[in-house]
Image (spheres, helix red, strand yellow):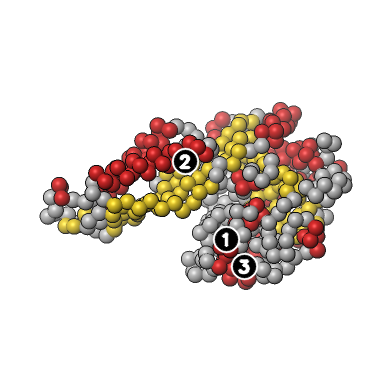
């Protein structure tokens, strides 16, 4: 079963052209570049014979109706937004491969038994607005639209204003087919998704290092993010004795060392990162009176993620108390780990064996739309290698052969799920 990889690669290149000026690909939510890409995808899907519809937040779907009208859809796809100056594969690969796979299956085998559908989610990255998974989050019920009036981009434009400018939001355009498929008049919530399959570049180096062609994702790590403020007393660097100092930066240094030590003791797959640090007043001859920094902590097991965060917070509080500092630890993101469906994982492994492809089981440290579907329905993720593990960069690259391998594994799984008698 060889889906036409050339069609997928052509679609990827065409999508990459919808970008703001600058290196790589920049396609932020509800911008002209994003709108152009979504319209282009609708045209492409319709031209290939898929039944196309959009929802109130701008997700685009292309449906291949099955002969068994069970009301349950096998959904596959990914997102089309990017980070600033990102690559052309992250997200878009999963969409282009899904479109190609459905067209190949329809042309080769005719209508499926069970309905297949491509999803091009409007947003996953959180690059324009301070939230992630806006597209799949509305589909799965993580969001109900109430955040749209209160969340704004750096220019002060709210989500709702940006949606309205694109003709979306309450009262946005709909199609008649949406009335009978679990999609409300002004809601993106879906109740008809029976399975979700996502193909994605790894965005890491494990597959390349192990020379494995396919990654069969067992779970997507849960994430906890915090902003931390450590407050002491700013004072003269030359006249304040050591014993009278309340140095916020020295306390922060102790906390970051504790973070690294605790993460090393916890071991894989836990990872913990302090990604941004701001020192106030940031003057060479003044003892820092305040430091703000961020924490990003990830693990594939919810209990271990929670216990690590609790123990780390206790260690930070002890350091602050010992040094006479005050500590504010504010959670900014909490996503649960997303275990993938083991039956689907087993089917992927069997397909790899049948196709003569090497594979490895792995945990995804990066977040993906699939983790929102995991509590809702059986979900699976397929990874292909990323050169040098580079992603979110113009240097992001996966070879045509690697992309084709992922496409053909995805196509075989969709055939098994949608065409074979259960």
Residue 17 location, x and y as percent? Answer: 64, 59
Q: Which residue is mark 1?
A: 28
Q: Nearer the viewer, mark 1 or mark 3?
A: 3
In the rendered structure, the answer to whether residue 204 lies left or right of residue 55 reads left
Q: Which residue is mark 3?
A: 163
Query: For the residues marked 1 and 3, what is the alpha-carbon distance in whole angstroms?
Result: 12 Å
In the rendered structure, the answer to whether residue 104 lies left or right of residue 272 reads right
Residue 356 location, x and y as percent? Answer: 71, 28
Structural crowding at the residue carrying mark 2, measured as other residues with C-alpha within 10 Å and reported as few (<14), some (14–19) or many (≥20)? some
Q: Tell me: residue 354, above or below residue 255.
A: above
Q: Tell me: residue 301, above or below residue 391.
A: above
Q: Residue at x 24, y 44 (%)?
A: 322
Q: Residue at x 61, y 65 (%)?
A: 30
Secondary structure of the residue carrying tag 3 is helix
Secondary structure of the residue carrying tag 2 is helix
Q: Tell me: residue 55, above or below residue 346.
A: below
Q: Which residue is mark 2?
A: 306
Query: For the residues marked 2 and 3, what is the alpha-carbon distance in whole angstroms?
Result: 35 Å
Looking at the image, tell me whether mark 1 or mark 2 is earlier in sequence order.
Answer: 1
Residue 215 location, x and y as percent? Answer: 62, 35
Looking at the image, tell me whether mark 1 or mark 3 is earlier in sequence order.
Answer: 1
Note whether residue 177 is visible: yes
Kindly check if marks 1 and 2 are in contact, taking CB atoms under 8 A apart as contact: no
Q: Residue at x 85, y 48 (%)?
A: 69
* Quadrant assignment for the C terminus: top right
Residue 174 location, x and y as percent? Answer: 75, 65
Note whether residue 24 is visible: no
């Amino acid at each position: 079963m060889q889906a036409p990889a050339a069609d997928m690669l052509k679609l990827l290149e065409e999508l990459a052209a919808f970008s703001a000026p600058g290196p790589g690909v920049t396609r932020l939510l509800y911008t002209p570049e994003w709108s152009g890409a979504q319209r282009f995808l609708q045209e492409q899907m319709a031209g290939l014979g898929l039944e196309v519809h959009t929802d109130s937040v701008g997700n685009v779907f292309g449906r291949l109706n099955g002969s068994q009208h069970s009301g349950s859809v096998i959904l596959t796809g990914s997102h089309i937004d990017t980070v600033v100056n990102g690559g052309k594969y992250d997200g878009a690969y999963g969409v282009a491969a899904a479109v190609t796979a459905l067209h190949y299956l329809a042309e080769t085998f005719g209508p499926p038994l069970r309905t297949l559908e491509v999803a091009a989610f409007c947003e996953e990255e959180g690059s324009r607005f301070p939230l992630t998974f806006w597209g799949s989050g509305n589909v799965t019920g993580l969001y109900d639209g109430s955040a749209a009036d209160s969340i704004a981009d750096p220019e002060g434009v709210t989500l709702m204003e940006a949606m309205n400018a694109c003709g979306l939001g309450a009262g946005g355009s709909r199609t008649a087919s949406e009335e009978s498929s679990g999609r409300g008049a002004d809601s993106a919530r879906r109740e008809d998704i029976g399975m979700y399959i996502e193909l994605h570049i790894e965005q890491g180096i494990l597959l390349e290092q192990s020379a494995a062609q396919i990654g069969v994702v067992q779970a997507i790590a849960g994430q906890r993010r915090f902003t931390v403020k450590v407050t002491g007393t700013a004072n003269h660097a030359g006249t304040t004795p050591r014993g009278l100092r309340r140095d916020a930066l020295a306390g922060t240094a102790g906390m970051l060392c504790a973070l690294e030590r605790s993460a090393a003791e916890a071991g894989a797959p836990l990872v913990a990162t302090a990604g941004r640090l701001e020192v106030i007043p940031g003057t060479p001859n003044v003892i820092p009176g305040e430091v703000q920094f961020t924490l990003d902590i990830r693990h594939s097991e919810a209990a271990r993620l929670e216990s690590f965060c609790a123990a780390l917070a206790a260690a930070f509080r002890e350091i602050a108390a010992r040094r006479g500092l005050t500590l504010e630890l504010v959670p900014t993101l909490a996503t649960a780990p997303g275990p993938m469906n083991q039956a689907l994982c087993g089917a992927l492994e069997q397909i790899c064996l049948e196709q003569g492809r090497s594979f490895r089981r792995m945990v995804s440290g990066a977040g993906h739309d699939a983790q929102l579907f995991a509590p809702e329905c059986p979900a699976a993720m397929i990874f292909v290698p990323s050169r040098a593990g580079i992603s979110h960069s113009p240097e992001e690259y996966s070879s045509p052969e690697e992309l084709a391998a992922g496409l053909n594994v995805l196509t075989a799984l969709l055939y098994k799920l949608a065409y074979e008698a259960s």
